[in-house]
Image: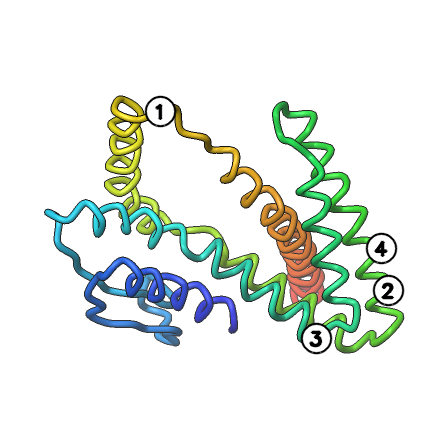
Amino acid sequence: MIAVPVHELSHAVMCILFRHKIDKVVLFDINLSHKALGYVEHSYNPASPFQVIGCLFIGIAPIFGGILAVSLLTVGMLDNGYSFLIDLANAGSALRIETPIDMLSLFSTSFDICYLQIGIALKIDPVTAVTWMFLVGTIGLYLSPSYADLKGSFKGLLVLILGVIFTQWFTTQLDFTFIESFLVPLSTILMMTLFLSLAIFFIAITVSTIAYCVIDR
């Protein structure tokens, strides 16, 4: 399963970037008695604000690692993959998210782009397109941080917030618009991933229900 290694590698890369010591990495654990399919054990210096803030980014790393993996798969597998990603990114860049209506508009635009581009991909090479949809959808199913990830991120989030507040006191007003200009285009790729994840989820539920009914008879 490609999703689990992507998830755990994302944690591991962030551990390296924030100078955490990696004690153990399990990209995929086939032992069903364990609670997690994969995990990264790491340690850090709690006296280092940089490493503590790193806990936040290590915890949420699978979101960005998943988006990167999905982007690479899209460009690498689909003939229209590059234009697909450009259209999604442009849709995000063109909108300024200020109200829930703006978010719904972004959602609707992203869905329309996905419907159009996936339709094109299916016409060009149906087998590759379906394989791509499956891979992207499975990555999306394991994209969100686990409870343990979020719990570990809390300290980092707290230190980051305190750092921003402290900086605001002693410097000029910080401008965070660059964060929006970076995250909103990424969110459209994330939405595309979640669309396919939901599709796989409902297909799996439907197949399981049909199989159960057939076996029960």
Asked whether the residues under the numbered discs 1 and 3 touch, taking CB atoms below 8 Å apart as contact, a structural biologist would say no
Q: Helix, strand, or loop for circle 1?
A: loop
The residues bearing labels 4 and 3 have C-alpha atoms spaced at a distance of 17 Å
User: Which residue is located at x 77 percent, y 61 percent?
Assistant: 83
The reply to whether the C-beta atoms of the residues labelled 2 and 4 are less than 8 Å apart is yes
| In this rendering, the label closer to the viewer, 1 or 3 | 1
Q: Residues within 10 Å of mark 1 (few under 14, many from 20)?
A: few
In percent of width and height, residue 117 lies at 81, 59
Q: Amino acid at mark 2?
A: Ile
Q: Which badge, 1 or 4, comes first in the chain's sequence?
A: 4
* In the depicted structure, whether residue 215 falls above or below residue 209: below
* N-terminal label among 4 and 3: 3
Residue 153 vertical placement versus 65 (above, below): above
Question: Which disc number belongs to residue 116?
Answer: 4
- Locate residue 30: give its quadrant: bottom left
Front residue of 185/122: it is 185
Rendered image: mark on residue 172: 1
Give the residue at x 82% y 68%: 121
Question: Marks 2/4: CA distance?
Answer: 6 Å
Element carrying mark 4? helix
Residue annotated with mark 3: 77
- In the shown orientation, is residue 165 left or right of residue 77? left
**What type is the residue that disc 3 sits on?**
Met
To which residue does mark 2 refer? Answer: 120
Q: Is residue 109 left or right of residue 158?
A: right
Q: Quadrant of residue 196?
A: bottom right
User: Which residue is at a point 47% across and 51% down the rendered structure image?
Assistant: 144
Q: Is residue 13 above or below residue 172?
A: below
